[in-house]
Amino acid sequence: MPVGTAGSVKALPPEDLEALGASICLANTYHLYLRPGAAIIRQAGGLHRFIGWNGALLTDSGGYQVFSLQELRTVNADGVRFRSHLDGSEHLFTPEGVVDFQSDVGTDIAMVLDVCSPYPVEHSQAATDLEVTLEWAERSRRHHGSATPLTKPALFGIVQGSVYPDLRRRSARAVVDLGFAGYAIGGLSVGEPKEAMWEMTEEAVAELPSKQPRYLMGVGTPEDLIMGIDRGIDMFDCVLPTRNARNGTAFTSQGALPVKAARYADDFGPLDPECDCLTCRRHSRAYLRHLFNAGEIAAMMLTTRHNLYFYLMLVRRARRAIIDGRWNAFAAGFLASYGQAGAAST
């Protein structure tokens, strides 16, 4: 899912996302709650109409953003009280209020409010955070069940538990018992070693139903997508393809390519010779390097378009390989070629 935190995927309008074949993108409750607010979005006819997006929408609950504020928030039995990073004003997020906000703006998939433990964290603190997360999940599920059909998005539960297998298993079993439309694995890709991330993913997936969506939040690199799919993950989101594009890095079949590097000054080939996106069909590495060095906004737009196309095509190819019964060969081939190419390009 391309990430449009404040209702916009940076450097790319909705019509370009549709042309790339994106069918769902992500927006964020915390940022949309602070501005423009639910009232404006409702007046516009809902979030889809407000941002001009015809596909599906998933809204993150804002839990990660609130808990990243650290000094600006406090957690209690009701929810989390925090101060806006914009103007210092005080606000309260409750499990019920977050469900209401996402319902009010007309999202398609809503996330429950959760506590994202930092890394590193002691087992005792992770267990405490998990208890709050599970209590909030139960409150969210109960409140969601009382909503009217016209304002009821699909609600996903979130598995927490930091890097502790017993907590991850317990969390996954508990959210499944509550019964959600889909299940997310949160609190990973927050600084822990990759080995721990995949171990915790496996612990959670082992307890999650295979016939409902399983969503690994905030992940990741092209290799991460393949590694996650191999472990049974169905949905991903990450700012990496768009953020790296704005900073001058393209993802290609030959590995990550630093577009601004001097060696591309007279390279008139495409970003990726195996890519047929519009950027690769019409523009060279030399031209894109020139745009970045000249400070042209088009540099970010063209590279963002390529990176999102690369990610979306990678997932389409993965899906096709699964359907055709050649997943293992596809995954092994991609990881081997991409890893070697990436090492060679650094």
Image (cartoon, helix red, strand yellow):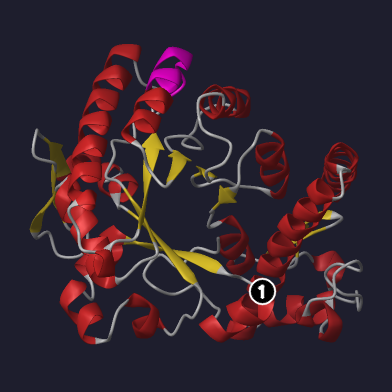
Where residue 39 appears, x then y in whole percent?
A: 16, 77
Asked if residue 207 is positioned above or below residue 342 in the image, the reply reads: above
Magenta-span inclusion, residue 166: yes
**Residue 13 appearing in the image:** no
Q: Specify the segment rendered in magenta.
A: 161-170
Q: Nearer the viewer, residue 167 or 278?
A: 167
Q: Helix, strand, or loop for circle 1? A: loop
Q: Could you tell me the amino acid type at mark 1?
A: Gly
Residue 266 in sight here: yes
Crowding around mark 1 (Cα neighbors within 10 Å: few <14, some 14 to 19, many 20+) is some
Q: Is most of the magenta stretch helix, strand or loop?
A: helix
Question: Residue at position x 55%, y 29% from top?
Answer: 205
Up-down relation of residue 175 to residue 292 (above or below): above
The residue indicated by pointer 1 is: 21
Q: Is residue 43 magenta?
A: no
Quadrant of residue 301 in the image?
bottom right
Picture residue at 26% right of the left edge, 37% below the top = 137
Residue 289 is situated, as x and y percent measured from the top left of the image, at 75, 75
Percent position of residue 97, x then y: 15, 54
**x then y, percent, for residue 124:** 28, 13
Compare residues 109 and 151 and report the one nearer the observer.
151
| Picture residue at 18% right of the left edge, 40% below the top | 139
**Which residue is located at x 18 percent, y 48 percent?**
143
Q: Please indicate whether residue 210 sits to the left or right of residue 329 in the image.
A: left
Picture quadrant where residue 334 is located: top right
* Relative depth, front residue between 143 and 302: 143
